[in-house]
Amino acid sequence: MGFVKKNTKLKVNKKKERFSVYLDQEEGPAALLETLEEKSIKERKKRSEELVQYHWDYYSYFVSQRNKIIPLLKEALIKNSENTFAFDNWNRCFTFKYAMNPLSARGSINSIGGRFNIGMDLNDTLNYFPALYIAKEQTTALLEKKAILIDQGGNPDDMLKKALSGGSFGMVSVSGVLEKCLNLKDIRVLSDFLNLIKGTKLSNELVERAKELGLPKPKAVNTLIQLQKSIFYPKWRTMSVLSDYPANSQIIGHIAASAGITGILYPSTKDGSDCLAIFPKNFKDTDSFVEISDEYPESIEYHRMESSNFHNFY
């Protein structure tokens, strides 16, 4: 007889179909998988499929609206980007398999991607693209790499111990200069962007379907605070996995990268320290570069990413 742990998720993934059935111990007998009746399982599955389809249609609607103004959105981001951003002795935390190329961004396209880039496992409405993630502080780089929060009532020392446990990783000091860097530490740089997207009217069909499913009335982002919260939503990864579409932060990253912006400066959701998402593909025909600051083994062939060799890092 099998017991299902609290909040266990039964999940089926296909290229174009994802749904989840949640079981909760608080539902009593539902904690025993064998006691679930076939009718109940089918109802839960149907409900999950309806929710996923609704969220997919919700996302698709906004894609269609956004595509009408993509050139204007790109222009808004470029206009509010810093012409040059220099960083010195920041930190790159990487998976051990990339030890011979610590500046490689290849790992960022695995699975669903990172906060500001899109991975290969998300739907194909947007092309996947890499990003190199670095942080000003070593602890921040580690926490970001391990996706660990320290601001939710936990002891920071305990969280760092958790980050240091399990799996091999490396850390290198890096310096560089980026042309056209979007500084999201000041959310006001997105004011022009917001003015283009706010006030988007939802279709009556989506509103009615939300009502039928017992969901809150769908809303569009209309303020900078709402936009900021959506970009730095702590559980963005879970939502992307379940829904199979990009998070708002990934959409912002996609538009920025498509506009030729080389990086996004942002505060870590882990401890508030500075982080950078760097887009190697946009180094072409620029003076942007990232290089390892310290002495490095002779076996490391690529220690500096720049216009002439950026393609070797993804």
Image (cartoon, rainbow, N blue to C red):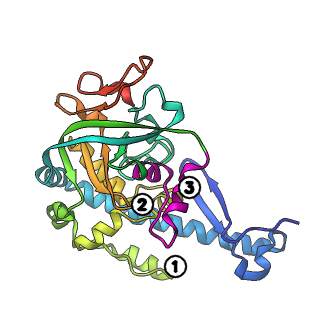
Give the residue number, with chain letter if any, for mark 2. 270
Question: Which of disc 2 and disc 1 is earlier in sequence?
Answer: 1
Q: Residue 264 — which label?
A: none
Give the residue number, with chain letter if any, for mark 3. 161
Q: Residue at x 69, y 75 (%)?
A: 24
Secondary structure under tag 1 reads: loop
Mark 2 vs mark 3, foreground winner is: 3
Circle 3: is it few (<14), some (14-19), or many (20+) Cα within 10 Å?
A: few
Secondary structure under tag 2 reads: loop
Q: Position of residue 6 (x, y in %)?
A: 70, 71
* Quadrant of image for the C terminus: top left
Position above or below: 122 against 309 = below
Give the residue number, with chain letter if any, for mark 1. 213
Residue range corresponding to the magenta coloring: 140-166
| Measured Cα–Cα span from mark 3 to mark 1 | 43 Å
Mark 3 vs mark 1, foreground winner is: 3
Secondary structure under tag 3 reads: helix
Question: Which of disc 1 and disc 3 is earlier in sequence?
Answer: 3
Left or right side of 182 for 25: right
Q: Residue at x 40, y 58 (%)?
A: 247
Amino acid found under the numbered disc labelled 2: Lys
Judge whether residue 63 can be spotted in this image. yes
Q: Residue at x 44, y 61 (%)?
A: 236
Q: Which of the 4 image quarters holds residue 209?
A: bottom left
36 part of magenta stretch: no
